[in-house]
Image (spheres, rainbow, N blue to C red):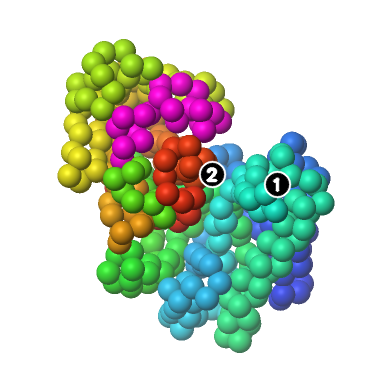
Amino acid sequence: MAKIAPEEKESPSSTMLFEVVDHGMVPLQSIEEDEELSEGSLFSIDIDLHRDHDHVEDHSDGIYVAVGKNNNKSSMDALLWTLKHPIISSSSTFVYLVHVFPVVRLIPSPLGMLPKSKVNPRLDEKFVARERDNRRKLLQTYIEACSAAKVKVDTVLIESDMVAKALLDLIPTLNIRKLVVGTSKSNNSYLVIGYWENHPQEKMSSLEGKLETDVEIKAPASKYHEIFKHRPHHVSNHASDFVQGCDLHEGEWGAVDSVICWKYFHDGKPRVAKVLVEAIDDENNTITFKVLEGDLMEEYKSFRGTMKCIPKGDKESVIRCSLEYEKLHDEIIDPHTLLEFFTGLTKTLRNTSLRLKLPHKLTCVCFVRWSN
């Protein structure tokens, strides 16, 4: 367990970047360190959002502001709005800067992007140091804005590929009552800055739900569509960490009403999903799978997955994965980790683009939406 100590400096040290630091107050949150990455890796320390936090002192009067990448206008607008808004009730109110940084699985090397376990430790250390400097610079911009407004500030950093889910999970974990989030115009056609009063009892309102994630790739939509329509059984050859096999049980590859069986590794376990190819729309590069049997049906009454490849110019596209489901009971959590699985699979396939007959390596950028 990483030790958390009070810090008096306004500027974050490298240790502060991976702790919830509370100046002169009881720490909000313990931070767990992965035993396998306990050598001081930049990405080895993370907030555990699933622990029991009944013992944590209530700091619900704090204002939590989600901040993104450096020079992110919507994040800075959200922070400046917070500093000027009367939701800051007194000079003792803390502003907590919440930043979600992605899980790093690949390290740049002279040979290209390689898994962390495959690179030279010295190269890994250099990359870690560079990322630490980048994150320090990112936070410093926001911290200086708070200091200029004479507002007390602390930081919360979370390692996750699912920004929206990480923020949602943080609300009951830290008993957040006011969360300010800036939304970029490019994603939602408008800018929203506001605060969210926490109502945990409303978190799960229905057994039915829908999740979506978008991944931008530098490849034509039709090419990616063809992979999962006609050659899904080749995917395991290039992304064995995610998919171990895809067998045809009924029908033929690329045909509606065919039944195929996916063998995949998810949430630390090997799993199986027998699915029906329910619909194929070549004009819109869309495939819909309906789960018939397998591990998912132990928790869901129904489960469908749709992959739509949306052209974005001649050489780029957006891969949209949509999950629609009905849970067996309200204690089942929404399948956010399956979206993480989809994102990781796509990022892995980018490194095997030649064998999969894609024109170039895929460069991925993820955006996440959720709804119940």
- Seen as rendered, the residue at the extreme top is 249
| Rendered position, 214 above or below 282 | below
Residue 101 rendering spot, x and y as whole percentages = 57, 56
Neighbour tally class for label 1: few under 14, some 14-19, many 20 plus, Cα within 10 Å: some
| In the image, residue 237 lies in the stretch drawn in magenta | yes
| Rendered position, 195 above or below 343 | below
Residue pictured at 30% horizontal, 32% vertical: 229
Residue pictured at 62% horizontal, 45% vertical: 105
Q: State the mark number for residue 15.
A: none
Residue 27 rendering spot, x and y as whole percentages = 68, 56
- Element on which disc 1 rests: loop
Q: In this view of the protein, can residue 21 be seen by the observer?
A: no
Q: State the mark number for residue 44.
A: 1
The residue under label 2 is: 351
> Which of the two residues, 244 or 274, is positioned nearer the viewer here?
244
Left or right, 33 with respect to 91, comes to right
1 or 2: mark nearer the eye: 2
Residue stretch in magenta = 225-246
Residue pictured at 52% horizontal, 33% vertical: 239
Left or right, 321 with respect to 36, comes to left
Q: How many marks?
A: 2
Neighbour tally class for label 2: few under 14, some 14-19, many 20 plus, Cα within 10 Å: some
Question: Callout 1, which amino acid?
Answer: Ser
| Rendered position, 363 above or below 133 | above
The N terminus - image quarter:
top right
Left or right, 307 with respect to 179, comes to left
- Separation of residues labelled 1 and 2 (CA atoms): 24 Å
Question: Callout 2, which amino acid?
Answer: Asn
Residue 219 rendering spot, x and y as whole percentages = 39, 51
> Which of the two residues, 316 or 277, is positioned nearer the viewer here?
316
Residue 148 rendering spot, x and y as whole percentages = 61, 86
